[in-house]
Image: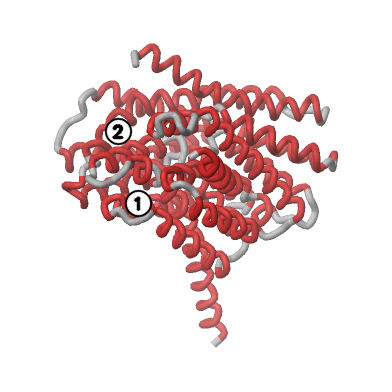
Amino acid sequence: MSEYGLIIGDLFSVFRDVAPVLVVALFFQFVVLRARLPNAHRIAGGFLALVVGLYLFIVGLDMGIFPIGEAMAEKFSHPDHKQWTIAFAFCIGYATTMAEPALLAVTKKAEEVSSGGLQSFRLRNIVAIGVAIGLAVGVQRIFNGDPLWIYILSGYATVLMLTWLAPKEIVPLAYDSGGVTTSTITVPLVAALGLGLASNTPGRDPLIDGFGLIAFASVFPMVTVLGYAVTMKTIVELRRRGDKR
Amino acid sequence: MKYLFQLFFRSVMDVAPLLVVIFFFQFVVIGESFPNTPRMLAGIALVITGLFLFMRGLEMALFPLGESLAFSFAEKGDVKLLLAFAVAIGYSATVAEPALLAVAEKAELITHGRLTAFALRNTVAAGVAFGIALGTIRIILGHPIHYYFIGGYTLVMALTAYAPKDIVGLAYDMGGVTTSTVTVPLVTALGVGLASSISGRNPLIDGFGLVAFAAMTPMATVMVYGIAVL
């Protein structure tokens, strides 16, 4: 696509992202609920910042990150240097998740609500490590050709087991982190890697094996967040028991 | 002003790991320099500035709007209206989502039109709408989230057994793709706001989880669509 077309196309895609949400929200606020919006000026200014920010973010990704990232994903999507492909999947999973705006939003809210008890930065690191492990395992699966559902089923079984052990304050947040990890930055790069790998590995079908990598990036963060919470809880309990003695 | 500098610095730190990874793999592993360095640096500067403005917009606009809606709904006490909102926001935010559009078109191409992009998008959007509505009901009732989670994923697993092999991977991916960068903050603020304004609800335990619902239900609806047409 031409430079000009790219810039206009990005503006259009941001608009398509923001407009429906804003229209529905404002319609309910003013027409259905007939409620006033306190600080309307500030909110209008904030929306402008949000739209411009999202636009610059996406244009920047298209200019600076995606061309090189996708070229890399293509380069690493050959089964002849498996270790590097897995290492690349791990690193790119971690790095894209740390900069994922939707995850930033959720962890920021969690930090607010817990009055700083759940630090956004730490939470994002745990989620990002989950995505990294998930993608590494997912790439390994494309090489092996194991059925997808076995991995996803065992992933969710682990999540359930950990849910039972974890403090209940963390459970909804852990589940949410599965849904938000894969968005603006992660999906294009991961999809390029998955579809490339599935096309270049003999005996793999792009439709069956190429898709499904993103699913790994949503199950594993739930496991790491819950696992982290269970570990911390256990450590605190062991310490408490130690103090009593 | 000092706060804005901090916020900007944080955006730099958020993007830093991505730069480290890309530089490492390009220079050390692949052993090539970048094809167009000035363009790339400009792109990185835009990404950082964009993230900074986005975060500022979140705290100035999107979070307050979500909270304000939650309080208004709680004050009104009309559950049907709240569910109508949940459905409207879930459907409208998803059906035109650029990431979904891309995946849906790719799926139509690969299946030679047996799955149409239009039907797929609507199936996913209906799934998200239902998911957010169900999640809202959970907040009102104060049920533990994992019961819904167990029920939902049991259904997904059962459908996996019946669904044509071709659609399983696609359906699983739909869970992750649907929730966009604008919807997530609004829906999160709405959930937390509702949990804060209903007495006896804890924002952490009851408020979060709407995004997880929105990620779960499309998997089920897409597989049902696949069973129906393939």
Q: In this view, does B71 lie to the left or right of B93?
A: right
Residue type for callout 2: Glu
Q: Position of residue A141 (x, y in %)?
A: 32, 54
- Numbered disc 2: what chain? A
- Numbered disc 1: what chain? A
Q: A210 and A5: which one is in front?
A: A210
Q: Image height check: is A5 above or below B67?
A: above
Give the residue drawn at x 55%, y 41%. B228
The tag on residue A7 is none
Q: Where is residue A159 in the image (x, y as percent from the top left)?
A: 51, 62
The tag on residue A138 is 1
- Tell me the residue that label 2 is attached to: A70
Q: Which quarter of the picture shows residue B58?
A: top right
Give the residue drawn at x 52%, y 39%. A102
Task: Point out the image quarter for the N terminus of chain A.
Answer: top left
Q: Where is residue A160 in the image (x, y as percent from the top left)?
A: 54, 64
SS assignment at label 2: helix
Q: Image height check: is B80 above or below B112?
A: below
Visual colour scheme: secondary structure
Q: How far apart are marks 1 and 2 (CA)?
A: 18 Å
Q: Image height check: is A5 above or below B126?
A: above
The answer to whether residue B16 is seen in the rendering is no
